[in-house]
Amino acid sequence: MLGLQHSLVIIPAFNEEGSVGRVVTNVLKMKVREVVVIDDCSTDQTAEEARSAGATVVSLPERLGAWGATQTGFRYAVRRGARMVVTMDADGQHNPTDLSALITPIAQKTSNVVIASCTERGSKLRKIAWRWIKRVAHLDVSDITSGFRAYDRLAVRRLAAWPANLIEYQDVGVLLLLQRNRLTISEISVTMADRKNGKSRIFSSWGAVIYYMAQTLLLGASKRSRFSLRSYPILGRP
Amino acid sequence: MVAVLTGLRGVAVDTAILLLIRNVRLYTANGRGWLLVAGLFAALGLAPGIFDMPANLPGIAYPPALALTLAVGAIVVKLLLDDIQYSRLRVRHQRLAQRMALLETELRRLREQRGSSDSKSAGKKAS
């Protein structure tokens, strides 16, 4: 059966020198196969910190954004023949001890993708935005923006292919692409820590929020499918 | 006089396009379309009446309105085609950047493996 020793953990990072080393160290303690930090053209010591903590570092020649960096990780995973991939944030929000619960539905072959959901986080405004987006895009997932997810080989191959390059953000666009490919998604409930360093790239300013909402609602309306995602009840931690 | 001026404007645009192609500033395939547009400018300038008959058929009272509508339509189509092309180029560019980063990582790994095997063989020779 698949286990953490088969999991490749992808961590996209942009100017996260204060937290990336600690995150890599904590993930490596979980005995995963490899930790890959995709350095999205950081201007600080992110790459050096990640490398010295034991991660493989893929340095992008120019900034591709959070999704572009994550997709680079998926392409790396395809090249390395990874059987399972987990994506995590570099800011220390995600708890590596949840990794085992996160990959269980994939190891048991009951899901292609598992999302670590934490619906408690986020402001009221953000929750209203999520509700709108889910309604427009026909998405039956409780936490659409969580970057803490596990993917099986099939999902990784789909997301590494070129149509996924047209996605701008890693949340709704990715879910819609998975929906079109009729992949199954489940969720587990987790708690997430507050961001220790840096700030959200999506919600960095009001202008960024408006841009994000316009892009995401357009994407949701244009790509919504008559096949809704096969939804599963949120699983508790075993 | 106005007809001559607008006709000359078309000829000037044609000349500019030819110069841009000659100086390798404009791709020949893109230049073809612009030459056609400039040719139409010149034709419209020198013979403004060429739109009278096509405008009369659907009953357009003011023939230049037809020319203007067609021109705006052509601009919209051109802008849309440009954006489609831009999206294509952006995907290609992004994939190349990703591929370059992946190859650099592989190269680093191979160098490290080679370095460690070299140091091992050097250690064996020394012993």
Image (cartoon, coloured by chain):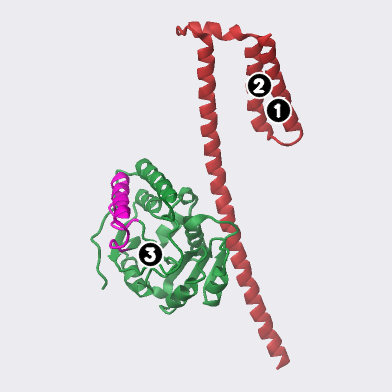
Chain colours: A green, B red
Marks 2,1: beta carbons within 8 A: yes
Residue A13 visible in rendering? yes
List the residue tagged with mark 1: B17
Residue A1 visible in rendering? no
- Where A60 falls versus B60 (above or below)? below
- What is the C-alpha distance between the residues marked 3 and 2? 55 Å
- Which circle marks residue B38 in the picture? 2
Disc on the earlier residue, 2 or 1 = 1
Tag 3: amino acid: Phe
- Where B90 falls versus A153 (above or below)? above
- Where B68 falls versus A28 (above or below)? above
User: Which of the two residues, B56 or A131, is positioned nearer the viewer here?
Assistant: A131
Tag 2: amino acid: Ala
| Same chain check for tags 2 and 1 | yes
Marks 3,2: beta carbons within 8 A: no
- Where A86 falls versus B122 (above or below)? above
Residue at the image point whose x is 59% and y is 61% from the top = B101
